[in-house]
Amino acid sequence: MEHVSIIRLQDVTVTFDSQTVLKSVDLEIKAGESFVIVGPSGQGKTVLLKTLSGLITPQNGKVFVEQQDWLTLSPKQRLPLLKKMGILFQKNALFDSLTCIENIAFPLRETTDLEESEITKKAEYFLEAVGISHARDLFPDEISGGMQKRLGIARALALDPEIIFYDDPTAGLDPITSKKIIELIIKLKKQKGSTVIAVTNDMNRAYQLADRIAMVVDEKVLITGTPEQTKNHRDPRVHQFVRGLTEGPLTTV
């Protein structure tokens, strides 16, 4: 199963208001891998993530999900594929009017046939897994940003998706919490054998999570390889970015 392509982009171009963000991108993500997207701000990391998850339709090219041509599928044909995906957005997209446990229970109630007692048990398990059991009956606006992020992750994972998209899962979190969140993502990924596709601005977290890393820069997606290959990459843009150097080809005057 490891080597099967789960998502593939073929000659994909994405343009907004005549501004090209991604140009002629070819990319293949294997089932079961952790694929991490990095790159300078505003270059299109989230656009790539949303294109891979089917949320953005490219102007050009093809998107294959489990070998099926996504752009030619009807909404009904897309549904079984969508059910296999989980997405955590930067803003977490939580329901303000529901408590933490209700936020996790909601999608379980809507999309599974589980008994109410099983839903509660599962929701409690994921609250515990992300370390916020104590916030069980609090509302999102009563907990910190870091806890909201953990809640968002718990909710994204509760449906046991096969492909999980994370848009900057550790944004705004302190280094210790960030490390714990990535450990949690890795642990749950191993349990399920799922595929993880994540955007991050933190190279330490990228190295911690990734099997392979890609950098979005100059409208292209540059596969930089494993964490070790990325650290020693010869491209001067990659070299500058991963070391956080203030001078180099990425620095605009």
Image: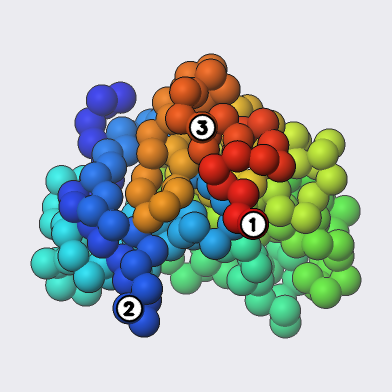
Residue 28, x across and y down, in percent: 27, 39
Q: How far apart are the two marked residues, 1 and 2, measured between alpha carbons?
A: 25 Å
Residue 215, x across and y down, in percent: 47, 42
Residue sitting at x 43%, y 62% = 47
Q: Is residue 128 left or right of residue 231?
A: right
| Type of amino acid at the residue the image marks with label 3 | Pro
Quadrant containing the N terminus in the rendered view: top left
Between residue 193 and residue 209, name the one nearer to us: 209
Residue bearing mark 2: 18
- Tell me which label, 1 or 2, sits earlier in the chain: 2
Residue sitting at x 54%, y 62% = 42
Q: Which mark is residue 253?
A: 1
* SS assignment at label 1: loop
Q: Which mark is residue 41?
A: none
* SS assignment at label 2: loop
Residue sitting at x 49%, y 58% = 43
Residue bearing mark 3: 236
Residue 190, x across and y down, in percent: 51, 28
Between residue 111 and residue 9, name the one nearer to us: 9
Above/below status of 31 relative to 147: above
Label 1 Cα crowd, 10 Å radius (few <14 / some 14-19 / many 20+) = few
Residue 160, x across and y down, in percent: 47, 47
Residue 200 in view: yes
Task: Tell me the quarter of the picture where residue 26 sits.
Answer: top left
